[in-house]
């Protein structure tokens, strides 16, 4: 079982000092995919004149913008970092940059515009997002007493970028790892093979703390990540078991696989099942007729 962490103290509109170098403000956009809302992080010293980085400004919400501006008053935003272009993370970036006189926005390259399978979910892209600086992973960004490393973590989104705070051995994980829930991996932009590879690389780094964009910090990092990985492997095995039992479609599998979760999440769950099936077909463990899609017919591959 994944040792979820869901309880934490917060109030909308309040700036919380959550570590020596990290403050957090949570946007009032709760929902089945955002939990209590988007947590925007301010990284840097809380002292007049210091420069800070803002990670995941969040949705285009005027109240959240004003809260962030109050939270950084007397300091300078030197960088705005965005983990990925989903609309609960990215839209406020340009508005915030303009409000503080043009702080540069840094993110991975925006994926080519496609019709996403997740378009009806909160996981849709902000189609207007355009970073000033394109990150590929490995870049170092520094300020007054802080150093952040860009860490490419594709899977939830092809352009997902996590950020490492070296001074605290901490990872801002965006949606790659969340303490309150598993992560949606929705094709065509989401990719389960890439996701599992990224998860292994995060586990190998030995972080002390993970700060997801939604929900509280993860402090028991290694056991949590191992359980997170094992859950994905178990889900893959469960899908194979459903195929062995005669299920041929995703619509048949989801009610059995996700009977215990909120049915509002079943559309997202269907997309994760599709992502697992794409990986199984790629690995030669399953077949799809005619090809892996939501409506395809699936079967275990014959030996």
Image (tube, helix red, strand yellow):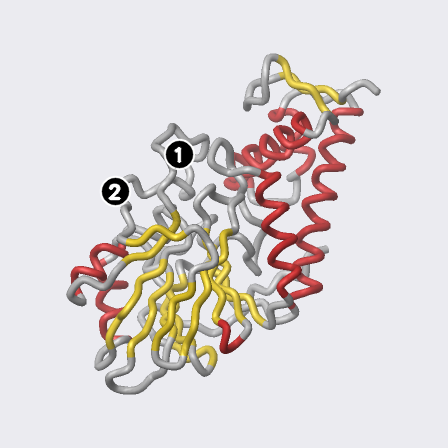
Q: Residues within 10 Å of mark 2 (few under 14, many from 20)?
A: few
Q: Is residue 213 visible?
A: no
Where in the figure is residue 102, as x and y percent of width and height?
A: 18, 62
The residue lying at 57 percent from left, 60 percent from top is: 179
Q: Quadrant of residue 289?
A: top right
Q: In the rendered view, would you say 47 is above or below 129?
A: below
Name the residue that disc number 1 marks: 119
The residue lying at 31 percent from left, 62 percent from top is: 80
Q: Quadrant of the N terminus?
A: bottom right
Q: Point out which mark residue 128 bears.
A: 2
Task: Give the alpha-carbon distance from disc 2 to disc 1, as whole Å.
Answer: 15 Å
Where in the figure is residue 229, as x and y percent of width and height?
A: 68, 51
Q: Quadrant of residue 52?
A: bottom left
Q: Residue furthest front?
A: 139
Q: As rendered, which of 208 and 117 lies closer to the eye?
A: 208
The residue lying at 55 percent from left, 37 percent from top is: 191
Where in the figure is residue 147, as x and y percent of width and height?
A: 43, 73
Describe residue 155's horizontal placement relative to residue 201 as left or right: left
């Amino acid at each position: 079982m994944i040792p979820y962490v869901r309880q934490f103290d917060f109030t909308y509109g309040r700036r919380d000092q959550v570590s020596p170098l990290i403050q957090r403000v949570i946007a009032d956009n709760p929902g089945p995919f955002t939990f209590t809302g988007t947590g925007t992080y301010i990284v840097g010293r809380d002292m007049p004149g210091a420069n800070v980085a803002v990670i995941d400004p969040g949705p285009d919400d005027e109240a959240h913008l004003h809260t962030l501006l109050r939270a950084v008053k007397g300091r300078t935003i030197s960088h705005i970092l965005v983990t990925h272009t989903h609309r609960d993370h990215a839209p406020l970036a340009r508005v915030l940059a303009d409000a503080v006189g043009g702080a540069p926005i840094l993110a991975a390259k925006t994926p080519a515009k496609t019709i996403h399978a997740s378009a009806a979910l909160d996981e849709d892209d902000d189609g207007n997002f355009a970073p000033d600086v394109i990150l590929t992973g490995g870049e170092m960004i520094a300020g007054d007493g802080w150093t952040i490393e860009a860490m490419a973590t594709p899977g939830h989104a092809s352009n997902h970028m996590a950020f490492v705070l070296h001074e605290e051995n901490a990872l801002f994980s965006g949606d790659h790892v969340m303490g309150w829930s598993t992560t949606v991996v929705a094709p065509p932009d989401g990719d389960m093979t890439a996701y599992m590879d990224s998860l292994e690389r995060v586990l190998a780094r030995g972080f002390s703390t993970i700060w997801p964009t939604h929900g509280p910090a993860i402090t028991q990092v290694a056991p949590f990540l191992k359980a997170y990985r094992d859950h994905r492997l178990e889900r893959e095995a469960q899908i194979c078991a459903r195929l062995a039992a005669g299920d041929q479609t995703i619509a048949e599998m989801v009610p059995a696989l996700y009977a215990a979760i909120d049915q509002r999440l079943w559309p997202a769950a269907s997309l994760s099942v599709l992502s697992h099936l794409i990986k199984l077909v790629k690995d030669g463990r399953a077949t799809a007729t005619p090809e892996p899609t939501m409506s395809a017919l699936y079967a275990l591959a014959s030996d």
